[in-house]
Amino acid sequence: MGKLNMGILGGFSGTVGTVIGICKKNGDDIIIAKSKKKRTSNTEGQVNQRTKFGLVTGFMQPLNPVVKYGCRMVAGNTMTPYNYACKNALDKALTGVAPDIELDYSKVLISDGQLSQPTGATAQLVEDVVNFKWNDNSDSSSGIATDKAVMVVYNVDNYEVSYSIGKVTRDSGSGSLPIPNSAVGDYLLFYIFFQSANDQFHVSTSQYLGTAAVTA
C-alpha cells in the first residue's frame, strides 16, 4: 500500500495500483510503473503437451494440400481438415514418454472416409521413382473403377512431399510417383487413398504402405 508524504498533492511511497512511488535521498519523489510478473508454463505436463503438439503439427503441415481433400468430410463444420488430422494423430499416433516421444507413421491418417480401400496395396522405391500397386476391387466393394488414386511420398527428413491426385484410377491397378527433393540416407514414407469419381471429398481411409531409405 502507498503512503502519502505531503498530502494529496504531494509525493507518495509504496505501491498504488500499477505504479510505485519512491522518495530518493535528495528529496525528489519519482513514480515508476510496476513491472508485470512473467507467467511461465514449464510444468512437466505442459512441456510434454507442447512437445507432442509441435511434433504433430510439424509433420502434418507439408501434407495439408492432400489432407484438405482427405479429411474434409469427417471434419465437418467444427474444424478444418488439417486440425482434424492433427487431432487424430495426437490421439492415436504418438508413442513414448517425454522427452522421447515419437510419431507412429503407420497410425497417421491423411484421409478418413467410408469409400472402400484398395486391396493388396504396395509401394516400392526404384531409384528415384516410387511404384504403387493395388488390386482393382471395384466389382466387390463400394468403390467403382473410375475412383481416383491419391498417392503420396513424404521425405520426413526434410519435410518435402510428392503427391499425385486424380491421374490414375482404381481399375488401373498401378501408378508411379517421383520422389521429392531428397539426399542419400533420407527416409521416405508411402501413403495411398482413393477419391470417389463423383465426389472428391468422398474418400477411403488412407493406408500406410511402409518406408524406404534413399540410397542414391
Image (cartoon, helix red, strand yellow):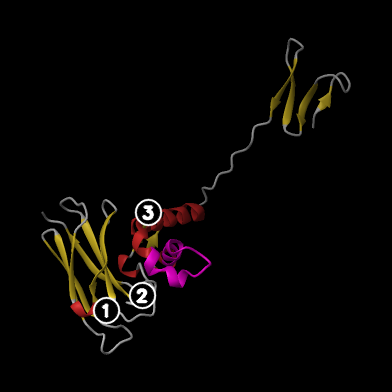
Amino acid on which the number 1 mark rests in the picture? Thr
Q: Is residue 170 visible?
A: yes
Name the residue rendered at 76%, 34% in the picture.
17
Q: Main secondary structure of the magenta part?
A: helix
Between residue 19 and residue 172, name the one nearer to us. Answer: 172
Mark 2 falls on what kind of element? loop
Q: Which residue is mark 2?
A: 203
Magenta-span inclusion, residue 160: no
- Quote the CA–CA distance across marks 1 and 3: 34 Å
Residue stretch rendered in magenta on the structure? 68-88
The numbered mark at residue 84 is: none
In the rendered image, which quarter is residue 24 located in? top right
Q: Earlier in the sequence, mark 2 or mark 1?
A: 1
Give yes or no for residue 80 being in the magenta stretch: yes
Q: How far across and down, in percent of the image, does residue 119 sit?
A: 24, 81
The residue that label 3 is drawn on is 58
- Vertical arrangement, residue 12 with respect to residue 125, above or below: above
- Given this view, does label 1 or label 3 mark the residue nearer the observer? 1
Pointer 1 residue: 146
Question: Residue at point 15% right, 51% down?
Answer: 184
> How many residues crowd mark 3 within 10 Å: few (<14), some (14–19), many (20+)?
few
What amino acid is found at the position of numbered circle 3 in the picture?
Gly
Picture quarter with the C terminus: bottom left
| Amino acid type at mark 2 | Val
